[in-house]
Amino acid sequence: MDLGLAGRKAFVAAASKGLGLACAKALAGEGARVFVVSRDARAIEAAAKEVGAAGWKAADVSKAGEPEAAIEAAVAALGGLDILVVNAGGPPAGTFQTTELPAWDAAYQLTLMSAVRLVRAALPHLKESDQGRIVFITSVSVRQPIPNLVLSNSIRGGVTGLSKTLALELGPDGITANCIAPGTILTDRIRDLHAGGGSLEESLRKSAAAIPVRRIGTPQEFGALCAFLCSQHAGYITGQTIGIDGGALVGVH
Ligand code: NAP
């Protein structure tokens, strides 16, 4: 199937590794021209090389002004924008009772306001595209809270509401907005969350055994879904949260 992504101009946030990198690779593999961003200049430069990206910039998407500057650099490098993949590092783990107030403010900036800032900056350019696409990377936690991740459980719901609102507002402009909600996809975030106490392999094995398909997902599988949602075939899919979790979510929606 030709996804129709050749020459499309894509911005992928938080893309030096993990899910963002997987999206960047999948889009570039389909011929899109990709601009990648993360905080660590060395890491994002190396990722850009690996992807064959058209450009990169070091930026912290949780800090006012940096998402905007990154979008500006991408538009200058690409000559416009068709695709925005919104992503950031995950907020720290913790229960409600162990999480202090400053961590709530930081998670709000990292998870919700980074998305708001990226979309605000990208929107005038996406409106000029004949096939605008916005994909937010969220989590299965928007549907089923994950123990010890109160910040993700609480704040990612705001991104889901934002995405649905954008789908309603921007549909007439031909722009789609969707969320991808990963369950457990093997990245450093998952390795870190499973690293506390005991062996990492054992913890991952137990986690896989509880998933209906009996394995942890791969970043490649995640990237392929992102590329499809950005493709010419996905113009009638908007306002959705698409789970990719091996069937782990227990619920009918
Ligand atoms: P990861 O492997 O830890 O990668 C995180 C990426 O984000 C890195 O490229 C990092 O690069 C970048 N980054 C972190 N903070 C940033 C910031 N403030 N500004 C710009 N870039 C930033 O994580 P992942 O597994 O790919 O997860 C991506 C998102 O999906 C996270 O929010 C995570 O919580 C969520 N998620 C993942 C899973 C999963 O199964 N993997 C499941 C549910 C939800 P730098 O260090 O260079 O900035």
Image: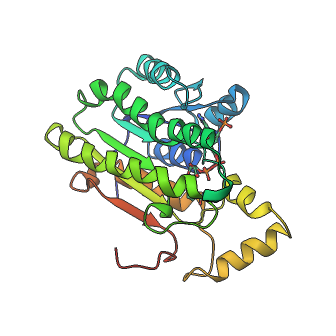
Location of residue 202 by image quarter:
bottom right
- Protein image colouring: rainbow
- Name the image quarter holding the C terminus: bottom left
Which residue is situated farthest in the right direction here? Answer: 198
Q: Is residue 148 above or below residue 210?
A: above
Location of residue 80 by image quarter:
top left
Q: Is residue 94 visible?
A: no
Q: Is residue 149 visible?
A: yes
- Name the image quarter holding the N terminus: bottom left
Which residue is situated farthest in the left direction here? Answer: 172
Q: Position of residue 110 (x, y in %)?
A: 54, 38
Q: Residue at x 38, y 62 (%)?
A: 242
Q: Residue at x 50, y 23 (%)?
A: 64
Q: Residue at x 51, y 42 (%)?
A: 111
Of 133 and 87, nearer the camera is 87
Q: Position of residue 107 (x, y in %)?
A: 56, 42
Question: How many marks overall?
Answer: 0
Q: Position of residue 193 (x, y in %)?
A: 71, 59
Of 64 and 178, nearer the camera is 64
Q: Position of residue 30 (x, y in %)?
A: 44, 46
Location of residue 85 by image quarter:
top left
